[in-house]
Image (tube, grey):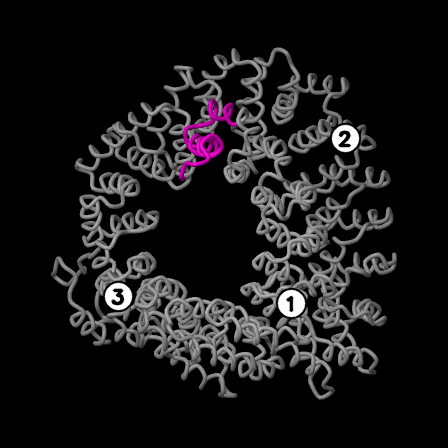
Amino acid sequence: MKEPVEGTGSQAEPGLSSLLARIKNHNEFQSAAASTRLSIIAALGRLGAAADSAVPDLLAAYKSLPDDAEVIAQALKQICRDSKTAPVELVKVLATDDLRIRDLADDLLTEAACLKNAAADLRAILNDPNSPVRDKAACHLQEVGSDDRQLVSVLIELLDEAETSWETQAVLKSAWLYSLPELVRLICDPSRSLRSKLRAAAIILEINCIKRIKHLTDRSFRTVDRADQRLLEAALEGTDSWTRYCAACALSGSDSRHPKIYGTLIDGLQASQAELRCCCLKALGRRRNEREQVDANVTARLIELLEDPDPEVVSAAGAVLSQLRFSAADWIALIGLLEQRALSYRVLSLLREQEEVPVVAVTPLIHILCHGGLEGEQVRLLIAILVKAGRPALEAMRSVILDSSLPGNVRAAVLRGAVKIAPAEPEVISLLSGLLESDDPELRMSAAIEIADKMDDSQPLIPLLVAGLQSEDYSMKHSALEALKKIVAHSPTVLASVIPHLNDVPREQRLMLTFSFYHGNQQHPELRRVMLSLLHEMNQGEDERLTWSVVLRELICVEPESFLLELLADTDEDLVQETLVVLDASGLSLSDPLRDQLEQILSGANQKSGLLAALILFKADSRNNRLRIIISEFLTGDDWELFQVAIDGLEKVPALDAKWAPLLIDLLQKQEARFLAIRQLGTMGAAAEPAIPTLVEYLDTTSYFKVCAEALQQLGRLAAPAIPVLRAHLQKKGSLREACEALACIEEDHRPTLAILTQNLEQPDLRSRTCLGLACFAEALPTEVESLLLEVFQSNVEYDRSGAIRGLGSLKTKTAWQRLVQVLETENPSLWPMAASALGEIGREPEITVPLLIKVLNSESWQARQSAAHALGQFGAAAQSAVPDLMTTLNDARHFSAAAGALSAIGEPAIAAIPCLVEMLDNGEYRCEVLRVLTRFGPLAKAALPRLKELEANVSRCDLPKIRVVIEAIESPDSNL
């Protein structure tokens, strides 16, 4: 890990004091040779936070030595990430006038784990009305959990500035509970500027369109409340046009049905200001219920806006148009825009999304295709539109194909489209046969590709298809590969004719092509020889490594174990190492011969190969003390690459034993190993006790809080020193839930924590999350928790109610159940997903709850359907009446996993689902999930055994263990799987 510093006369990295002395002597440092400077800078970076006293000097050097800037930035990144003092120095630079160094400081603060230490300095910047970086300070303060109300009050005023930064917008969008009311008041305030009103409306639009919230599943919570909605509706009736436009935009994402919203937005499209036109367009796209009202004049105006000089207006107009169905006149108007090269891709994309293509559009589209100068993707889109037009376009496309004056690539692309319209018609087959003799090479190759599976004798096509593999056009290359695979699969005797041509193909395509043939012809001696030759031939460059790894993995899975042993015994260490990496990822069990081979590699001369072998063996036997010692030596050695390999390997081991504790405690000081060390120490009980002070210290970092909270939670009562710090996090919305989960396992007395959470319920931005935190203490303090949650449940704010509903799921009481049933019987469907999940957790009164959940399962909201499916599974056999609806839900890919899981949990009453699941085993997209579900059905899934036995005989070695687990679960239900 350590490298010598050039120019110092030492073969070992000098100590920190020596390096600091060199860089703090500014004149001498700047006059030193570039190689010496860079070596000193890099050495300081490798020392990490220990070198943080050099941060001011490195920042000065960044400013005065632009040629060294990249190395300095990297060193600062290494030092500042964990430093406790560097954030304060970075904030000083953040306030300077030098934009370049200011941006560097901003980036470094974003990654600083101890950003909290600079909070006071950031607040000083935030409160300085003359500071140009108040927005950046607000953004960083939000990262450390500062009060959103203060941030919003400052940033609202910045909306009047000439430019609104992304930081201002990001904080206002994130702090939406406080910013939405303030933004509404700004729009309705006659004293505020037109610029700030428009920006406020634009930010409200952005808040509305965020479709997912961390703890919720519906965007309906991120909209203006009833009181603010009334303010905006009143503004719609006012005389100031800008205020009306902005009010209409702000209302567009709400459920307001004010009759003037739509008309006001349409009027805004005529505005002279591009920013206003853009905002009205985005708002118009939100008025989903009024799309059908868009008349011809409005559509024509939207089409005109595609020629707007402002690119944002063009993009917004395109987004609205994509939601409409075009008339024949609209088609002609849009095709007319294809003459403008800059608009062609956007217009073609819009036309491509239409469900139908009018006949009247075919002729002008063909004209554009032939004479519009379209290229590449544009040609592909236009042909896709013609294909959608169907037979009315076929004759015109045939004329294009036969027009020798047109470019070959265009004719070839049209040919492929024509075949899609009428693939088996004799006229089309005749056309393809004739084009095999064409003078144009691309046309010949395309004809060969399209006719390959339609000819009895395909051997004459092989040279053309091999030539297609060498095409620069990816589509042509891929199609030629697929055609060759088809004819070889259809007629294995053709394979002998293909093999001599393999050397004509570029190496990467040759590997993939050979491997494709190899799948169905594994015993072919020539193919096996070519495969092995190619594996050795690949130079493992970045462009080839992925292909190399994929092919190697598949070979290991389809070949017998002797092939794997042969690879591991190869003299090419690169091949051996890649084989070890692939073996590790494959999940194959280790046979005795394979273990013996790995032991031989372990005792060999190559350290990296030995380490990889040791990690594979250790994953299979994590109690092996000899392997622990071997791997530990790499973690304490000087080779950086091997250190990283060891860390990556241990990440895959679920749990290390207590003997690792001393080393893991030492590794807490190394950034690269810290996450691993923290996670593993959490599983080690008393052996990890010496690490607790360090883990508590990391709770106050932005980078490590969550993983440390989880580790301390696992350590339970031993982690009592963490209680004060965790309680401090209860008032930060970003860490409240994790702090509660940890405290629930660590504390003996929860009452002080409950008192803090009770106070949180007075703060709007903490209330919903606090309800989720209260749920962690439901078992210990059920009466107190229920009382607090029911109080929030009565709120008029749906966002708060959603948190209370989720929290009630942690209680098993009759009262909690009754409140949740009320939600599904009478409430806004936006609350159904949370209520359904909570009812599943409670599991009471299935005779009443299950019918309600079936209703939700058939609702329009996909989030609600997903939650209902999961909840029904938690009722087990008591949810028998839901089986037909769950089986119907299997047909929806979004809900397949939840529905299948619910059916398996219901058990015997759901046995009718087994045949359907067996059919889905042939679908690669669903197979893994189906196997898991059949495992849970156990012996009830006996009807699946014949198909599973077939798969067992034919799947690859990598998939075989998964199949056998399911078979064992069905045949031996008492086994411990």
Mark 3 or 2, which is nearer the eye?
3
- Tell which of 776 and 678 is nearer to you: 776
Residue 328: % across, % down: 86, 46
Specify the quadrant of the image occupied by residue 374. Answer: top right
Q: Is residue 74 left or right of residue 777?
A: left
Quarter of the image that includes the N terminus: bottom left
Q: Main secondary structure of the magenta part?
A: helix
Residue 937: % across, % down: 54, 38
Is residue 348 within the magenta segment? no
Q: Amino acid at mark 3?
A: Ala
Q: Is residue 532 left or right of residue 338?
A: left
Residue 397's label in the rendered image is 2
Q: Amino acid at mark 1?
A: Glu
Q: Residue at x 65, y 23 (%)?
A: 450
Q: Secondary structure at mark 2?
A: helix
Quarter of the image that includes the C terminus: top left
Mark 1 or 2, which is nearer the eye?
1
Image height of 858 relative to 277, above or below: above
Q: Is residue 439 left or right of residue 18?
A: right
- Sequence-wise, the earlier of marks 1 and 2 is 1
Residue 206's label in the rendered image is 1
Residue range corresponding to the magenta coloring: 948-976
Residue 606: % across, % down: 20, 38
Report how far apart the C-alphas of labels 3 and 1 lie in the structure. 44 Å
Report how far apart the C-alphas of labels 3 and 2 lie in the structure. 73 Å
Crowd band around label 3 with a 10 angstrom C-alpha radius: few (<14), some (14–19), many (20+): many
Where does label 3 land, which residue?
Answer: 691
Q: Secondary structure at mark 3?
A: helix
1 and 2 marks in contact (CB < 8 Å):
no
Q: Amino acid at mark 2?
A: Met
Image height of 364 relative to 187, above or below: above
